[in-house]
Amino acid sequence: MNSTQVEKNTLFIKNTAKTLGFDYCGISKVEFLEKEAPLLEKWLSQNMHGKMSYMENHFDMRLNPAQIVPGAKSIISLLINYAPSQTLFTKSKFKISSYAYGEDYHHVAKKMLKSFLQELKTEIGEIDGRAFIDSAPIMDKVWAQKSGLGWMGKHTNLINKQSGSYFFIAELI
């Protein structure tokens, strides 16, 4: 594929993401996460994952998405802002985390991702891809950072320069 076609596809991907309701979209090349490998290994060996034993599973997949989707060349990272436009339930003594307002984000985002993948197939042609939101051993914050969507804050969340850190992160591999 020539550079003009790559630029055209990139523009289409980013515009379509916006149209479908994603706040930010970035694309990165699938590669082994060499820098993150020893950090993940140390984090696991120090038992930083507590009782989340599933974090020990699929070590190689976490570091190389091509093992999740064989032949993958790109990861499209997408951010969906969940910060409410207004404070809700101010008269209640109970507080609900911002991300818990509304429908379960897994269902909402998965529907958006399926539509996105279909749009890509229609415009670009037959592509083999899979959509994920908290459903696979993917280092989503790392990939979002690699695709230029933000940087990792001291709180270990991705921070976007324009919008902060109230995001769900989704991927198309």
Image (cartoon, grey):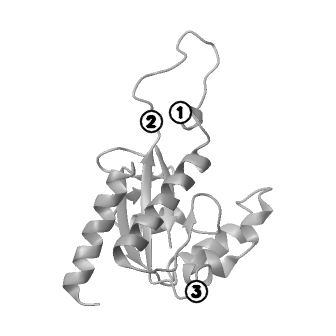
Q: Residue at x 79, y 63 (%)?
A: 53
Characterize the local packing of mark 3: few (<14), some (14-19) or many (20 or more) Cα atoms within 10 angstroms: few
Residue beneath label 2, please? 83
**Location of residue 147 by image quarter:** bottom left
Mark 2 and mark 1 in contact? Answer it, CB < 8 Å: yes
Looking at the rendered structure, the secondary structure element under dot 1 is helix
Residue beneath label 1, please? 98
Which callout, 3 or 2, points to the residue nearer the camera? 3
The numbered dot on residue 128 is none
Mark 1 and mark 3 in contact? Answer it, CB < 8 Å: no
Q: Nearer the viewer, residue 26 or 40?
A: 26
State whether residue 145 appears in this view.
Answer: yes
Looking at the rendered structure, the secondary structure element under dot 2 is loop
* Lateral position of residue 19 relative to residue 116, left or right: left
Q: Residue 155 location in percent, x, y?
A: 51, 49
Relative to 93, does residue 123 appear above or below in the rendering? below
Q: Residue 40 location in percent, x, y?
A: 62, 72
Relative to 101, does residue 26 appear above or below in the rendering? below
State whether residue 46 appears in this view.
Answer: no
Q: Residue 133 location in percent, x, y?
A: 57, 58
Looking at the rendered structure, the secondary structure element under dot 3 is loop
Residue beneath label 3, please? 70
Q: Residue at x 45, y 81 (%)?
A: 126
Give the position of the N terminus as an image quadrant.
bottom left
Q: CA distance from mark 2 to mark 1?
A: 6 Å
